[in-house]
Amino acid sequence: MSSRDVVLARVRRALADVPRGEGPEDAPVPRDYLRAHGSRTDEERVALLAENLAEYRALVHHSDTNGLAALIARLLDEHGARSVLVPPGLDPSWTAAADSTRIHDRTASTARELDAVDSVVTGCAVAIAETGTIVLDGSPDQGRRRISLVPDHHICVVRVPDQVVDSVPQALERLDPARPLTWISGPSATSDIELDRVEGVHGPRKLEVVLLSE
C-alpha cells in the first residue's frame, strides 16, 4: 500500500459518519473558545503589548503627538539613516523633524532600490497585546508589504489604546481578509539546527515600535 493509499484511507474513515451531500457550512462549529485570557484595562493592555514586544527583541518607545516627530528624528539619527521610506498616506508631520532624505513608495521601485533604503516608517492596522504582534494591512499609512520587509530598519507607530486589542480573535474582527496582511512579532529572525539565532533573514534586523498616546 502506497503512502497515498494510507492517507486516503484515513480521510475515508474520518468522513464515515458524514451524510452524503453535507457541506462544511451545513454543520455548525461551536466557537466557545476564550476570546481573551483575562480582563484588562486599556493601560494594562498597552503594558502587556510593550512587554511582549520587548520579549521579541523589538525596541519599544512611548510618545505623545507633540513629541512624535522629535522621537522619530532621533531614532533615525541613532540608526544613521540617510534615507527613509515613507508610505503615501503617512502623516507628513511624523517625519518633519528628520534630516533623512525621504524616499516615496513607488510601484517601479526594485528590490535592489528598496534594499538601499536605510529605514522605513509606517503606521499599523492593529496590535495584539497577548502575542506582541503588530499587523499591517497595506493601508495608505502602511504602504505595500514589501516596504516593511526589505529595508533593514522599521519604525512602526501604534496609536494607543485605540489600535491595541487583547487577542488574535479580536484582531481578526478588525481586519479585512482580502487585504495583504503582514503579521510582525519582533525583528526578522530564524535559528539553524544549532539554535544559533540569525536576524534579518526575511525582514528588518531592527524593529522599533512607538506607542503613540493621542
Image (spheres, rainbow, N blue to C red):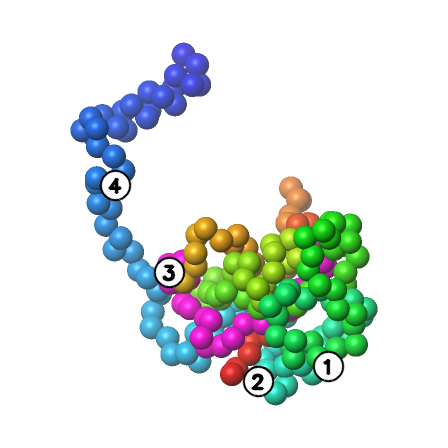
Name the disc covering residue 173, or none.
Answer: 3
Q: Which residues are magenta?
A: 150-172
> Relative to the observer, which residue lies in front, 208 or 130?
208
Between discs 2 and 3, the one toward the N terminus: 2
Q: Amino acid at mark 1?
A: Ala
Horizontal arrangement in the rendering, residue 211 relative to residue 27 (left or right):
right
Q: Which residue is mark 2?
A: 64
Between discs 1 and 2, the one toward the N terminus: 2
Quarter of the figure with the N terminus: top left
The answer to whether marks 4 and 3 mark residues whose Cβ atoms lie closer than 8 Å is: no
Q: Amino acid at mark 3?
A: Glu
Name the disc covering residue 60, or none.
Answer: none
Question: Which mark's residue is nearer the viewer, 1 or 2?
Answer: 1
Q: Which residue is mark 4?
A: 25
Between discs 1 and 4, the one toward the N terminus: 4
> Relative to the observer, which residue lies in front, 200 or 26?
26
Between discs 3 and 1, the one toward the N terminus: 1
Q: Secondary structure at mark 4?
A: helix
Horizontal arrangement in the rendering, residue 152 relative to residue 44 (left or right):
right
- How far, Cα to Cα, is label 1 from label 2? 15 Å
